[in-house]
Amino acid sequence: MRARIFLFLVLGIISSASGQNTIDLTFTAVDNAAYIRLDSIKVMNRTQGDSVKLLWPDTTLTFQTTPGDLLLFIGYALDYPAGTWSLGKKEKKLKLYQSYPNPVRDQAVISVYLPSKGLVNFSISDIRGRVALNFYREFKEGMHSFIFHPGEETIYFLTARWNGITQSIKILTEGQAGGKTCKLEYIGLDHENPSLKQSHLKAGLVVHESGILNVPVTKVTYTFQFATNIPCPGMPTVKHEGQVYNTIQIYSQCWLKENLNVGSMIPGNQNQSNNGLTEKYCYNNEPDSCNKYGGLYQWNEMMNYTSQQGTQGICPVGWHLPTDEEWKVLEGAVDSNYGIGDPEWDISWVYRGFNAGANLKTTTSLYPNGNGADLFGFSGLPSGYRYGTGSFSEFGYIGKWWTSTGLDGFVAWHRNLVSLGPEVRRDVDGVMNSGFSVRCLKDY
């Protein structure tokens, strides 16, 4: 039997007494195309700051909202055991589940299932085969969980042996300070797992979060998507202005997997202009850079010279330029510690989160000493950027992506993924005539 718990966060419940609309909302969810039962719903308002929570079997809500209130719907799916959607029928053999999170910074949870009581041998070795930990212990039947504390190595292999069956997992780490040794701390059987993400990781359950932003004006049924790291269902590719882009589903958000590359290249020392043609910069004025890493665009050129956030801009039909709020949903969905709607994502001008940046960055060798895990297929590249003065900088060390949320006509929010940091920076450190990368998000 599948064990799933969903928490839905809807922003926009309680609004001012005047000019209110009464709206009926209904919630459902799928994993790709398979129906998933909703267990709980939480509703919040990004405009007003209010929230309400519903418990299963309530999956409908009637509330009043002021026109224009931004609602954020967040679904939390608890997955048992860690790294799987369900146990299915009772297992007949030893099962060792991948550590969560992976890569590991300070600690991770590892679970092992035993179909019957027995003696288990656990061993941990590094990439050179040196054994860092080895012990035997007898366990009862059931799901047992451990906290793994990494040592100095960046790669470990954990092996479990029981009744002639051997299973192993590969654990990636972010590297620890000298002198630390890896440890495996037994938590207990079944319901004794600790929390790693907002106290939702428990009883061997790993939280999955799915978020939708919307401004409802009439009766709506919202369907949350819990599939991730797959091509967007029904739309694996998109053709746009002679280019073919792959798509990637990250819970309820469907993104282009590659940076946008449309328009004609102009030299970096010229400003893009409102001349009816799409213009782009290629890093160091090299056309091949655009082919590999996408174009760089000034904010107004990307927006097609409108200031309305969430506009289509230079994206394909049916797609739009992500807003600052939609980037926050992405960050919360992929981070191991801070969930969707967490105040952490509202912080400005600093690197935020725990490992959202690492989970969004490409796994290739483009980031010196700081490649990502790319756990969700976003594959963020360090494409560098163009200064407003016309020069190019920091290819291989940083990627910057515009949002469609401007502030005062001179600056707009954007996101930075950097070489050495696992977090994501929310910033306005470049004026609108800087040249940054662009990703498109499918209309909900």
Image (cartoon, rainbow, N blue to C red):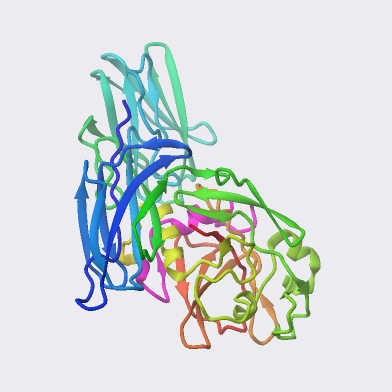
Picture coordinates of residue 116, whole percent (x, y) = 28, 13
Q: Quadrant of the N terminus?
A: top left
Residue at image location 42% in from the left, 44% down from the top: 226
Residue at image location 52% in from the left, 73% down from the top: 404
Picture coordinates of residue 103, whole percent (x, y) = 45, 46
Answer with the quarter of the image where residue 79 lies. top left
Picture coordinates of residue 253, whole percent (x, y) = 48, 54
- Which secondary structure dominates the residues rendered in magenta? loop
Left or right of 129 in this view: 132: left
Please state which of residues 328 and 131 is positioned toward the viewer in this rendering: 328
Q: Does any portion of residue 157 appear in the rendered image?
A: yes
Q: Which residues are magenta?
A: 345-370
Answer with the quarter of the image where residue 188 lies. top left
User: Can residue 353 be found in the magenta stretch?
Assistant: yes
Residue at image location 72% in from the left, 75% down from the top: 278
Left or right of 193 in this view: 126: right
Please state which of residues 434 and 195 is positioned toward the viewer in this rendering: 434
Q: Residue furthest top?
A: 164
Left or right of 247 in this view: 443: left
Q: Does any portion of residue 339 appear in the rendered image?
A: no
User: Can residue 240 be found in the magenta stretch?
Assistant: no
